Image (cartoon, helix red, strand yellow):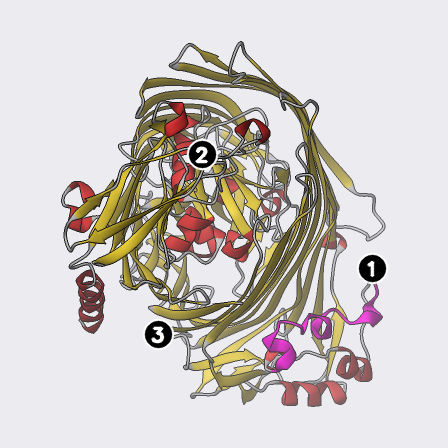
């Protein structure tokens, strides 16, 4: 109740500022062009930072407190005009003004329309004019909505939702169906468990525009069915130096009892720099053996133990620095550079249940039934260096992007394990470090071949290196005794140490393109032909070190958080030894390529019809090398899949009138699996469950069609109604199976085919339509509705390459990972507390529908992910020309996030609850202060 009262108070407080404001509005025209409207001109209230740009129709509106002001109208190549005005509360002062060139000698002046694509109104205009069905969000809109990273910004676009750590879902389709470009170049992932880089690692400070393609165009890669995201990094178009500092508090996460690996509880651990100290001992070499370490070697070589520290979790913190400069050189030459560095850390605690089911004669019962507690400490460091040089006909850019992430995890699972209901005090502890490093260098160029810029070429190349590692993953289990003790034994897989290393040794990406503009008068037809491609090599090492009980007691009691003292005493006396127990499957290699040529034609028929059509020929290759059980010297098995895709695309736009369009798009694409979905290793968890890639997965083929109606009532409003359909051949899906020990394995398979169709609705509504006094309010809303159906093949190819009878419970079902519906909305209010103090307040809400998380097998129903409602409050305030402040209240509803085992299997669930996973994130509050020098 107190949070509801707080929320209502915040809303009432902000709304109260809206009273007693007036506005200035009008139309700006071009005196030298028979008073035609003048778009993208500047309208400024002199002496303040309040202003606007005219829209495509030359219209503008500025809301401001009552008083006497001077309005300045200006545009490149025109004489500025100052007009005094008196603003009265709840009234609109109308100023229609014409600008002329005056004494300017226009025959000696080239007027360039270099308006910023980071502005919200410009992007709406671009969406209106484009033939391709593409949406964009720019730096201005992200700042207005209080967005701090790219992933959060993309959730403001129709049909896109963020699902915890699983990334972005587009039209209900999960991460596997997405693709990422950075400045038009293909970009590798930094995490092989994800298709693309987690986009919350990209600060909005370094982003100019994010483009989202939901339909195919020949110049982008064919590997997507949900969306392709193209991040256009900021070009440093102005001189600025800015420092940001932030702190955050999440209820039941910060300032609470927190467990962290003892090795990470240090200054190095705070910055995520302990990986070197926790990696595989050097004496075990680069290739595994069955070597047994001596007592002295064990005590010296393992610098990281099983102990954890109990602390109070600090507040979350962040710091960012941005500096850019632009230099105007001679003869229309400019040079700019940008440097951005951001670091943040985060403490989180997750409490809930974690369960798996098994099939017994009486029905489905728990195999594992745990109360689960996770303590996660995350760090991320990102930096961008950008250099840009431009002349009238040449653009050159060089970018270096570096991203480093770490996560320290301590996880306790307490309850029943392996269906052993006689012992409900089993405790399994996992102590794990994840780290990733990502370095991407890009060189890009564009050149106009002739003076009128009707012929242009562009080329770009990038080289990336990635490294993902779990240099220290270990666990032990036993029976909890009292509050802080545990009874454990040195046997089997207890006290096992795992070392996972996946290195992207090289990732090349390149493009080259020629474009020709032609036409009788305006030359608004464009022919484009080009090439783009990428190539990657990846090598993995997954090694194990296990203990040997020479003469230690069968079981012993020790402190749960300090087991090393007792364990080390047994090692010192040779009662316990450690030996490498890796097998021949420890290493695998993956090589992937994609090479494509394309041609595209944008052609305008008369005043209303525009066509964008073309074809892409894309050749892909996936080669996997791995060993099964056997000798380390056995030759690799090789699986190679070559595909040649002929990918046509057609986009048609019909302009119904000046404010509305009708669009149609169709095309063919394909989907490659996420790396770990097809990678031939079995990733083993402490509780006996595992994840196993299937190297026999095949790419999916996607056939897409879209129909869309757009209405742009004003420069700040839009209404969109869209219909879409897809057919996916051999969709890739997640499922659960059991091994010989009846443990649960997460793996992946190809189904036969899937059909999905649905509708999207989006609108941005300006409340000025209701009353002039509400001109500072706007409401944005988008929703997607979707129906899916999957036909299951009678046979399937498992991860060993065996063709077996399908063990899926249902032969027809919904598509795994797809929601039937989702909603995003935001209510925005802009107001000024003084001439230099401007504010934007936003309420942002999202929810998605129930969806299949994992396909049901062996008689079990599917595991479903249940709807989650998210409500955030953001207050962004520009206090002056130097200071800006952002306050965020996230996850105000704080729902329980749940997955459940469906109860429509071949037998009934005999347990009281069918919840398989649950937790709460907690309400989060953060403050970020920025200072611009």
- In the picture of the structure, the residue carrying the numbered disc 3 is 251
Q: Nearer the viewer, residue 33 or 754?
A: 33
Please state the extent of the stretch shown in magenta in the rendering: 266-285
Crowding near the residue tagged with mark 2, few <14, some 14–19, many ≥20 C-alpha atoms within 10 Å? few
Nearer the camera: disc 3 or disc 1: 3
Sequence order check, earlier mark of 3 and 2? 2
Crowding near the residue tagged with mark 1, few <14, some 14–19, many ≥20 C-alpha atoms within 10 Å? few
- Looking at the rendered image, the quarter that the C terminus falls into is bottom right
- Which corner quadrant of the image does residue 437 belong to? bottom right
Q: Nearer the viewer, residue 723 or 499?
A: 723
Q: Are marks 1 and 2 in contact (CB under 8 Å)?
A: no
**Local secondary structure at mark 2:** loop
Q: Residue at x 62, y 82 (%)?
A: 266
- Which corner quadrant of the image does residue 871 belong to? bottom left
Query: Distance from label 1 to label 2 (Cα)?
Result: 79 Å
Q: Is residue 857 left or right of residue 647?
A: left
Q: How many marks?
A: 3
């Amino acid at each position: 109740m107190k949070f509801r009262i707080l929320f209502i108070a915040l809303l009432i407080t902000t709304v109260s500022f809206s009273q007693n404001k007036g506005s200035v509005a009008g139309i700006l025209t071009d005196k030298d062009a028979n008073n035609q409207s003048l778009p993208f001109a500047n309208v400024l209230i002199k002496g303040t930072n309040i202003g606007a740009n005219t829209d495509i129709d030359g219209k503008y509106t500025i809301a401001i407190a009552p008083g006497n002001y001077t309005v300045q109208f200006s545009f490149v190549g025109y004489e500025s005009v100052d007009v005094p005005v008196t603003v009265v509360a709840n009234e609109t002062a109308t100023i229609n003004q014409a600008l002329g060139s005056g004494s300017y000698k226009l025959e000696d002046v080239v007027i360039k329309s270099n308006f910023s694509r980071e502005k919200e109104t410009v992007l709406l205009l671009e969406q209106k004019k484009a033939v391709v069905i593409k949406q964009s969000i720019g730096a201005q809109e992200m700042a207005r909505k209080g967005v701090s990273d790219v992933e959060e910004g993309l959730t403001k676009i129709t049909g896109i939702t963020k699902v915890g750590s699983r990334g972005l879902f587009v039209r209900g389709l999960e991460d596997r169906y997405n693709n990422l470009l950075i400045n038009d170049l293909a970009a590798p992932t930094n995490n092989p468990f994800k298709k693309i880089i987690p986009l919350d690692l990209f600060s909005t400070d370094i982003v100019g525009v994010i483009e989202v393609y939901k339909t195919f165009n020949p110049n982008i890669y064919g590997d997507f069915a949900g969306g392709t995201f193209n991040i256009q990094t900021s070009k440093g178009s102005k001189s600025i130096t800015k420092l940001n500092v932030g702190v955050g508090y999440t209820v039941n996460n910060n300032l609470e009892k927190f467990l962290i690996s003892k090795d990470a509880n240090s200054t190095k651990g705070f910055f995520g720099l302990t990986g070197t100290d926790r990696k595989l001992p050097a004496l075990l070499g680069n290739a595994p053996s069955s070597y047994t370490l001596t007592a002295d070697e064990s005590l010296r070589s393992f610098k990281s133990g099983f102990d954890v520290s109990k602390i109070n979790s600090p507040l979350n913190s962040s710091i960012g620095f941005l500096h850019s400069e632009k230099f105007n050189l001679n003869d229309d030459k400019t040079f700019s550079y940008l440097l951005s560095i951001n670091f943040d850390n985060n403490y989180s605690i997750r409490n809930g249940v974690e369960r798996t089911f098994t099939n017994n004669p009486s029905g489905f019962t728990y195999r594992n039934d745990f109360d689960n507690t996770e303590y996660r400490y995350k760090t991320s460091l990102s930096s961008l260096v950008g250099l840009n040089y431009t002349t009238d006909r040449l653009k050159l850019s060089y970018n270096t992007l570096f991203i480093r992430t770490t996560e320290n995890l301590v996880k306790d699972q307490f309850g029943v394990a392996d269906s052993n209901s006689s012992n409900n005090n089993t405790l399994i502890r996992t102590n794990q470090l994840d780290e990733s490093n990502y370095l991407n260098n890009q060189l890009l160029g564009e050149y106009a071949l002739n003076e009128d810029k009707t012929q242009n070429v562009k080329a770009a190349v990038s080289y990336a290196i990635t490294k993902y590692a779990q240099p220290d993953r270990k666990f032990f289990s036993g029976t909890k005794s009292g509050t802080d003790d545990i009874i454990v034994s040195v046997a089997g897989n207890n006290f096992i140490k795992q070392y996972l290393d996946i290195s992207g040794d090289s990732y090349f990406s390149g493009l080259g393109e020629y474009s020709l503009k032609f036409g009788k008068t305006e030359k608004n037809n464009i022919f484009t032909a080009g090439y783009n491609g990428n190539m990657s090599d990846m090598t993995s090492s997954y090694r194990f070190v296990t203990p040997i009980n020479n003469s230690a007691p069968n079981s012993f009691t020790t402190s749960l958080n300090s087991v090393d003292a007792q364990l080390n005493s047994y090692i010192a006396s040779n009662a316990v030894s450690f030996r490498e127990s890796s097998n021949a499957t420890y290493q695998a290699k993956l090589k992937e390529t994609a090479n494509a040529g394309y041609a595209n034609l944008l052609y305008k028929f008369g005043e209303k019809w525009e066509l964008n059509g073309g074809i892409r020929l894309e050749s892909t290759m996936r080669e996997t090398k791995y060993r099964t059980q056997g000798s380390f010297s056995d030759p690799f098995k090789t699986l190679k899949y070559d595909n040649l895709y002929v990918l046509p695309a057609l986009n048609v736009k019909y302009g119904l009138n000046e404010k509305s369009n009708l669009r149609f798009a169709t095309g063919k694409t394909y989907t490659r699996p996420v790396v770990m979905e097809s990678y031939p290793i079995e990733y083993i968890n402490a509780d006996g469950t595992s994840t196993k890639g299937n190297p026999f997965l095949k790419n999916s083929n996607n056939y897409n069609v879209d129909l869309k109606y757009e209405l742009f009532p004003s420069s700040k409003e839009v209404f969109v109604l869209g219909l879409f359909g897809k057919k996916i051949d051999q969709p890739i899906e997640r499922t659960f199976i059991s091994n010989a020990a009846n443990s649960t394995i997460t793996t992946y398979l190809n189904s036969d085919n899937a059909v999905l169709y649905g509708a999207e609705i989006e609108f941005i509504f300006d409340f000025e339509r209701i009353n002039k006094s509400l001109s500072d309010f706007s409401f944005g809303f988008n929703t997607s509705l979707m129906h899916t159906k999957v036909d299951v093949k009678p046979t399937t190819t498992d991860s060993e390459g065996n063709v077996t009878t399908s063990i899926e419970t249902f032969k027809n079902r919904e598509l795994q990972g797809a929601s039937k519906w989702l909603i995003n909305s935001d209510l925005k209010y802009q107001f000024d507390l003084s001439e230099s103090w401007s504010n934007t307040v936003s309420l942002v809400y999202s929810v998605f529908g129930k969806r299949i998380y994992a396909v049901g097998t062996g008689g079990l129903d599917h595991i479903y992910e249940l709807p989650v409602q998210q409500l955030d409050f953001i207050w962004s305030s520009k206090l002056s020309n130097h200071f800006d402040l952002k306050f965020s209240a996230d996850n105000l509803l704080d729902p329980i996030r749940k997955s459940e085992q469906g109860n429509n299997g071949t037998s009934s669930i005999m347990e009281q609850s069918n919840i398989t996973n649950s937790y709460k994130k907690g309400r989060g509050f953060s403050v970020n202060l920025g200072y611009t020098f």
